[in-house]
């Protein structure tokens, strides 16, 4: 079955095929770098990353472009408030965003920055003006006349036909009921950043930035445009209006929108005290891989209700997968091959693929790998799993991890960096004991622990209980809990 994706434009799940043979050209609206990214932002960015990875696993070459919105109302306001240039203001948050994205396993797309494309944006406005689609106002701003684009509203499915021609709005974000001619270019204002261009001084509107940069990188028509559901209107509606009225061609073929994340059932907001950045969670002692796993566990079109219980569950799931992989690689498995296990592995790969082809059903893909782990662990316990089966199971894990990217045991160094950042930023008071404990127990990697457990086993077989006890004490000290059962030695981190 080919990949099926929901297309906001058609309101249906459609078969996905790129416009060009084997290449997918996709554009995702990136962060507005005026603050640290929050977990809602990363919900959307992880969803896009999963899509990108799955397209690649499906054999496509993926040209994935993301913008860094480094000019917008909020940035202009904050940089003016702090008395610094736009670039000085955004540099810190862009760096933080890229670090956070890497921390949570997001592969970096081709990045484009609004401030690096200002002349092309002015050129675009000039062309709209030539065609009579945009008009200039006295303050040197330019507006898009939506009456010139009869299809306005086709993405958000809103009927704007009764709207007042010529009524204007100059802020970047506004709600559906105030659809008006929108600013593609804002004239210069006292104390605000401005660029000199062929259409006069000023700065681009946010919607224009994405139209210009996406078409510059990907062509006038491309395969997919992504963002969170809040971007459907006005941002994406306006991008379509500007781009299609200029080129006369369909802009993006597919529109991919991730549903908003809630926190404990509520809209996330600073005033409600339920607002978390990625770094806030790490300072509380949570691993980046737990958050990635959790964000990936709910298909992108379903509501993801973030809870701390859910985050803890996700940590247990990741641990289980990592332990299983270690168990397979640890050796000591009897020689031979069991065709049933080989079948289990290949069926799991097929199930994961079918799940992801079904509008990226990540929950089902995760369920498939866990069913495999459950059955394979039982087979390992009973001796039914043989040495030559390990490769097929490891292969299924690898396919899983090409998408979910949580198996590498690299949380501790990432968490250490966040701790150092908090100290440098004067946020030492936010460092919790849980983070310190996690770092302490994480001094030992999973494979360090496994090799100590193997030493312990060897000591016990040799009836050297003194040595076994000493290793156990050392592991306990490092925050690893040991349980000796009749089936062997089990461990988990505190
Ligand atoms: P911004 O930095 O506000 O421009 O947002 C960056 C991306 O995060 C956009 O695609 C937004 O749609 C998305 N986003 C913002 N808040 C949430 C949320 N609570 N859940 C999911 N996505 C979000
Ligand atoms: Zn955009």
Image (cartoon, rainbow, N blue to C red):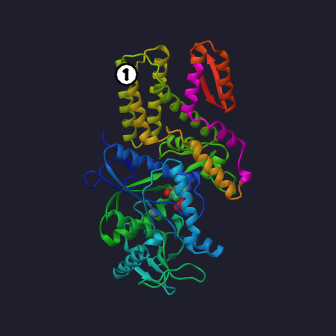
Image-based side of 446 in relation to 128, left or right: right
Q: Principal SS element in the magenta part?
A: helix
Is residue 66 located in the magenta-colored stretch of the structure? no
Residue at the extreme bottom:
138
Is residue 451 located in the magenta-colored stretch of the structure? yes
Residue sitting at x 45%, y 63%: 67
Residue 228 image offset from top left, x and y in percent? 49, 55
Residue wearing tag 1: 388
Q: Is mark 1 within 8 Å of ligand 1?
A: no
Q: Residues within 10 Å of mark 1 (few under 14, many from 20)?
A: some
Q: Is residue 90 above or below residue 437?
A: below
Please report the bounds of the magenta region as a residue range: 428-457
Towards the viewer: 444 or 429: 444
Secondary element under disc 1, as helix, strand or loop, is helix
**Quarter holding residue 393:** top left
Q: Quadrant of the N terminus?
A: top left
Residue 37 image offset from top left, x and y in percent? 57, 56
Q: Is residue 87 above or below residue 18?
A: below
Image-based side of 69 in relation to 51, left or right: right
Residue sitting at x 25%, y 52%: 21
Asked whether residue 267 appears in the rendered view, the answer is no
Q: Is residue 5 above or below residue 371?
A: below
């Amino acid at each position: 079955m080919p990949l099926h994706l929901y297309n906001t434009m058609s309101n249906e799940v459609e078969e996905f095929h790129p416009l060009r043979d084997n290449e997918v050209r996709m554009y995702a609206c990136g962060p507005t770098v005026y603050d640290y990214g929050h977990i809602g932002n990363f919900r959307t960015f992880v969803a896009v990353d999963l899509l990108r990875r799955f397209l690649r696993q499906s054999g496509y070459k993926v040209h994935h472009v993301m913008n860094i919105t480094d000019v917008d109302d909020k940035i202009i306001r904050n940089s003016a408030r702090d008395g610094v240039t736009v670039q000085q203001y955004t540099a810190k948050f862009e760096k933080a965003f890229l670090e956070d994205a890497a921390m949570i396993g997001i592969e970096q797309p081709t990045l484009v920055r609004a401030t690096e494309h200002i002349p092309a944006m002015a050129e675009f406005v000039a062309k709209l003006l030539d065609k009579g689609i945009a008009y200039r106002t006295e303050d040197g701003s330019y507006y898009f006349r939506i009456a010139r684009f009869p299809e306005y509203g086709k993405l958000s499915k809103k009927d704007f036909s009764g709207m007042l021609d010529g009524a204007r709005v100059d802020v970047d974000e506004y709600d559906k009921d105030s659809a008006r001619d929108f600013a593609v270019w804002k004239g210069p204002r006292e104390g605000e950043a401005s660029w000199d261009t062929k259409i006069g001084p000023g700065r681009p509107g946010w919607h224009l930035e994405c139209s210009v940069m996406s078409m510059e990188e990907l062509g006038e028509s491309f395969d997919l445009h992504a963002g969170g559901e809040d971007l459907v209107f006005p941002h994406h509606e306006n991008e379509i209006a500007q781009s299609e009225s200029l080129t006369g061609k369909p802009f993006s073929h597919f529109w991919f929108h991730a549903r908003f994340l809630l926190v404990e059932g509520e809209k996330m907001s600073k005033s409600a005290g339920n607002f978390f950045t990625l770094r806030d969670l790490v300072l509380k002692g949570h691993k980046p891989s737990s958050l990635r796993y959790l964000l990936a566990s709910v298909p992108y079109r379903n509501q993801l209700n973030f809870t701390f219980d859910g985050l803890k569950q996700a940590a247990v799931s990741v641990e289980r997968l990592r332990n299983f992989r270690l168990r397979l690689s640890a050796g000591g498995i009897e020689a031979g091959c069991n065709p049933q296990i080989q079948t289990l592995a290949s069926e799991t790969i097929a199930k994961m693929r079918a799940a992801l082809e079904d509008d990226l059903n990540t929950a089902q893909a995760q369920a498939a790998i866990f069913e495999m782990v459950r059955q394979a662990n039982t087979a390992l316990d009973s001796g039914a799993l043989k040495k030559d089966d390990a490769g097929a199971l490891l292969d299924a894990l690898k396919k899983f991890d090409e998408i979910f990217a949580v198996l590498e045991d690299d949380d501790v160094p990432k968490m250490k960096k966040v701790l150092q950042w908090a100290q440098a930023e004067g946020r030492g008071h936010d460092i919790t004991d849980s983070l310190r404990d996690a770092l302490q127990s994480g001094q030992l990697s999973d494979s360090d622990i496994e090799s100590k457990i193997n030493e312990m086993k060897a000591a016990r077989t040799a009836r050297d209980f003194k040595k076994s006890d000493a290793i156990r004490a050392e592991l306990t000290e490092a925050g690893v809990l040991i349980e000796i059962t009749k089936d062997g030695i089990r461990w988990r981190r505190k």
